[in-house]
Amino acid sequence: MITDNVEDLESIFNQQSFLIRLRGDEELLKELVSAFPTLLSKDIANLKRAWEQNDADNIRLCAHTIKGMSSNFSANRLREAAYQIEMVFKDYLAESKSGKICEASFTEANIGLLNRLDQEIEALKAVLINIFPEIFNKDDTPTTDDRLKEIAQESGAKLQEVIKYIEEQIIPKYPERLSNSKMIDSFGQELKKLADRYQIAFLSDYSLKYSKAAKHFDIIEIERIRRELPSIVYKIQEAINKS
C-alpha cells in the first residue's frame, strides 16, 4: 500500500529533486521514468545471480551500480538499501583474500538485506505507477490488427501491387522450410527489397523481425515468420476490402 505521508513518498521517489537535476525538462523526466524499471531489473537480476553464486565481489559491484542509479534517480530508500548491501560485502572482502564466499551461511545471514531491496523496488514501482499512470497503465506495443488498420489507409493500388509481388515473386520461390543459409539470406533480401520499395511500416517491421531471427540463425523463428507470409497477404486483402 502506498503511504499518504509526503515525506515517505519523497523518500521513495523525489520527483521534484529529479526534475531539478534534469533542469526542469519534464519530457526527459517522463522518458527516464519509463525506462528506469527495465534498466533497474537488469542490474537486480545480475545482483541475484551473483548472490546465488556466492560471488561477494560481484554482489558488491552490482549493489554499487544500483546505488548509483537510484541516487541519480532520486530514489533514496532504494539507494540506501543498495548501499547497505555494498558496505556489508565490502567489509567482508576486506577481510577475505577470495571473492568467493565459502560459508553458505554468510549469504543466508544477510538475506534480509536482499529482501529489503526487493521491498524498496516494489515500493518504488507502486509510487511511479501512482504518479505516472499514463506511462505504466497502457500498452503501446502495436498489434497486428493495429498495423493492418494503418496499411488499410494506403492506396488500394499500391497494396494490390504488394500482394501480387508477394504471391508471384516471393512465396513460390521459398518453401516454408528454408533449408540452407543461402536461401535464408535470399529470402531476407527479398523482404528488404519489398519493404524499401513500398515504404509500408508493416512490411518494414516484418522484414526487420526476420532479419533479427536470421542474424541469430534462429531456425524455428525463421520458419515461423516465413509461414506467416501467406496469412499476411490474406489480411492485407481483407483490410483493403474493409477500407
Image (cartoon, rainbow, N blue to C red):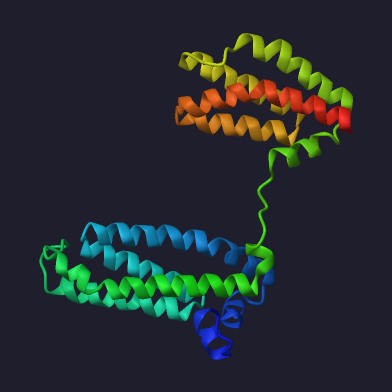
Judge from the rendering whether residue 82 lies leftward or rightward of residue 213; answer left or right.
left
In the image, residue 223 lies at what x, y percent?
53, 23
Judge from the rendering whether residue 120 lies leftward or rightward of residue 63; answer left or right.
right
What residue is shown at x 57% (from left), y 82% (from top)?
17
Image quadrant where residue 99 sits: bottom left
Vertical side of 125 occupied by 177: above or below = above
What count of labels does the image hold?
A: 0
Vertical side of 39 occupied by 205: above or below = above
What residue is shown at x 68% (from left), y 72% (from top)?
26
Judge from the rendering whether residue 181 lies leftward or rightward of residue 9; answer left or right.
left
* The furthest residue to the front: 1
Closer-to-camera residue (13/176): 176
Which of the image's four quarters has the C terminus?
Answer: top right
Is residue 83 visible to us here?
yes
In the image, residue 162 lies at what x, y percent?
77, 21
In the image, residue 91 lies at what x, y percent?
19, 77
Image quadrant where residue 90 sits: bottom left
What residue is shown at x 57% (from left), y 77% (from top)?
18
Is residue 85 visible to us here?
no
What residue is shown at x 70% (from left), y 38% (from top)?
144
Closer-to-camera residue (35/238): 238
In the image, residue 198 lies at what x, y percent?
77, 27
Image quadrant where residue 7 sits: bottom right
Closer-to-camera residue (42/225): 225
